[in-house]
Amino acid sequence: MRRILFVDDDPLTLEMLRKMLSDMQKEWDIHFCDNGLDALRLLAESHFDVIVSDMRMPEMDGTELLTHTCEKYPDMVRIVLSAFSDHKAIMRTVRLAHQYVPKPCDAEILKTTIERVFALKSLLKNPKLRRLISRMDAFPGLPATYSRITTLLRDPETSIQAVGKVIAEDIGMTAKILQLVNSAFCGIPRRITVPEEAVVILGLDTIRALVLTIGLFSGFEESGIPLQMVEHIYRHSLKTGSLAKTIAIHEKMSGGQVEEAFMAGLLHDLGKLVMVQNMPKEYGELLDATLDKNIPINDAEMKIFGATHEQVGAYLIGLWGLPDSIVDAVAFHHCPGQCPTIAFDPLGAVHAADAMAHVNPQFGGDVHGNRLSMEYLERLGLTDHIDDWIDLALESAG
Ligand SMILES: [Fe+2]
Ligand SMILES: [Fe+2]
């Protein structure tokens, strides 16, 4: 049974949560605490999967409680219950919380958030990797992009559009900004998938605080991490994103799906960056070996790490609460036929774009990329579209 701990010093909030979740008691083992110290005692006694904590509490506040939780129980999912107007409190937890649920609490939002988190566990079964990902608070970017963004933000005359443009080219910053904007941080009910829009919603002051004061982002350091490999993944991801968008437009997807296709393309190989960042030597050797022996990358990743880069990337962005369509596209971009929903959607566009990048080295040349799933395309009656997609890839490669 899944175990969840709610911590809030307000007895009325706890009572409301109890009533709200009474129908979930059969599936979830739910515990309530009115202070941080008792919460830590409970956590020391037995394992919990998720902690949902208030921010403002006497004695031990949410930041302190989540800091302890993150250090001692890194695999536990950390959700903050907070009023979206409480920006300062949220900024303090930007490195700690996986997701935010708005206060006053909506029963459906709370249940869906927790259910989605539980569903993710089946996506990534390796507990060691789950622990590792759960501790990740941000992603380093390319040193050049990082220095561009800091220069821009230090300039008092800078425009939000210019900042949005640079962020949209960076995988790590985009993922983090989308995490914040899709949470209770901004109190926006719809899902945001366009980084430029996310930057406008957050505002320059927040972005400045995240980058310059909190120092959430950094550049990949050359020491230990093969920068060339990182640059290759970035180049390939940007190309895949823009081609997925072109294919989505060509296939007459809706405006929202076109943007999702771009975003999912940009983030599709994020799992490789997680692995490069955390296990640079092992992952570098794996990439070399798959190249030398022409072994599919997923097979090698599964054998050595017990998980593929698709699973790792999808788990991270799912944990950060990015929209399901993007999580699915990342999770199934090598094997779209395994996705529970079979349709030519942003996942299909990313799958096709990624494969095009693979067949045409001119176009982002991802030697570790995937191949088109003919079975999936046959099921959707789309095999005669392949030539068009190759033409689009060639055109965009110039
Ligand atoms: Fe991939
Ligand atoms: Fe790829």
Image: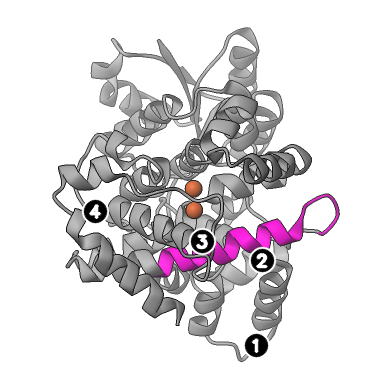
Cα separation between marks 2 and 3: 23 Å
- The residue carrying mark 3 is 237
Is residue 387 toward the left or the right of residue 291 in the image? Answer: left
Q: Tell me the mark number nearer the camera, choosing from 2 and 3.
A: 3
x and y percentages locating residue 198 in the rendered image: 43, 67
- The residue carrying mark 2 is 211
Badge 2 or badge 3: first in the primary sequence: 2
Q: Relative to 389, is 269 above or below?
A: above
How many C-alpha atoms fall within 10 Å of the one at disc 2: few (<14), some, or many (≥20)?
some
Circles 1, 4 touching at the beta carbon (< 8 Å): no
- The residue carrying mark 4 is 345
Q: Tell me the mark number nearer the camera, choosing from 2 and 4.
A: 4
**Which amino acid, mark 4?**
Asp
Q: Per the image, is 223 magenta?
A: yes
In percent of the image, x 49 and y 69: which residue is there?
A: 363
Cα separation between marks 3 and 4: 18 Å
Cα separation between marks 1 and 2: 15 Å
SS at mark 1 in the image: loop
Check the picture and name the quadrant holding the C terminus: bottom left
Q: Per the image, is 378 magenta?
A: no
Q: Tell me the mark number nearer the camera, choosing from 1 and 2.
A: 2
